[in-house]
């Protein structure tokens, strides 16, 4: 009788591990899912796995590779072409040779010049 009671109590205590927060950390699963999504996006964007690693430093490489490989298999099975990922270049900075005061004065002078021309 004591054994049966002990087994029932142990089963009850072990079934409540998730309720106490003793289960796996959900943030770890989320980080792995994010890394797989990054890998899949890199493959769909026609990036090599090495480029994907370089662009995403500090992220689990095994999960990136798993996502890249899954997307590769999916694209091959469904005969899909990837889309070249284009990163827009930043706009060139204004000329740094002119001091800021001169630039402000030039912008004030332009409306006057237009008014004089009319």
Image (cartoon, rainbow, N blue to C red):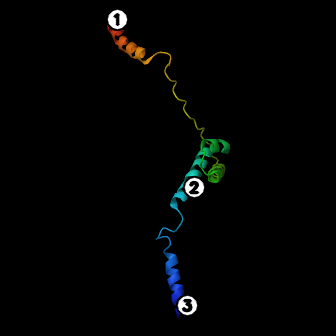
Q: Which residue is mark 1?
A: 117
Q: Which residue is mark 2?
A: 32
Which of the two marks, 3 or 1, is nearer to us in this view?
Answer: 3
Q: Residue at x 37, y 12 (%)?
A: 110
Which of the two marks, 1 or 2, is nearer to us in this view?
Answer: 2
Q: Residue at x 52, y 77 (%)?
A: 14
**Is 87 located above or below residue 26 in the figure?**
above
First-in-chain label (1 vs 2): 2
Q: CA distance from mark 2 to mark 3?
A: 42 Å
Q: Quadrant of residue 44?
A: top right
Mark 3 crowdedness (10 Å alpha carbons): few <14, some 14-19, many ≥20: few
**Would you say 26 lies left or right of 51 here?**
left
Q: Which residue is mark 3?
A: 3
Q: Secondary structure at mark 2?
A: helix
Q: Position of residue 47 (x, y in %)?
A: 64, 41
Q: Position of residue 42 (x, y in %)?
A: 61, 44
First-in-chain label (2 vs 3): 3
């Amino acid at each position: 009788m004591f054994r049966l009671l002990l087994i029932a109590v142990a089963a009850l205590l072990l079934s409540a591990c998730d309720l106490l927060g003793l289960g796996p950390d959900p943030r770890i699963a989320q980080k792995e899912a994010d890394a797989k999504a990054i890998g899949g996006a890199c493959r769909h964007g026609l990036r090599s796995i090495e480029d994907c690693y370089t662009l995403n430093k500090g992220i689990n490489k095994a999960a990136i590779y798993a996502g890249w490989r899954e997307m590769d298999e999916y694209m091959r099975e469904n005969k899909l072409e990837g889309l070249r990922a284009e990163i827009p270049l930043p706009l060139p900075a204004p000329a740094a040779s002119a001091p800021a005061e001169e630039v402000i004065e030039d912008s004030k002078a332009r409306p006057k010049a237009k008014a004089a021309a009319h």
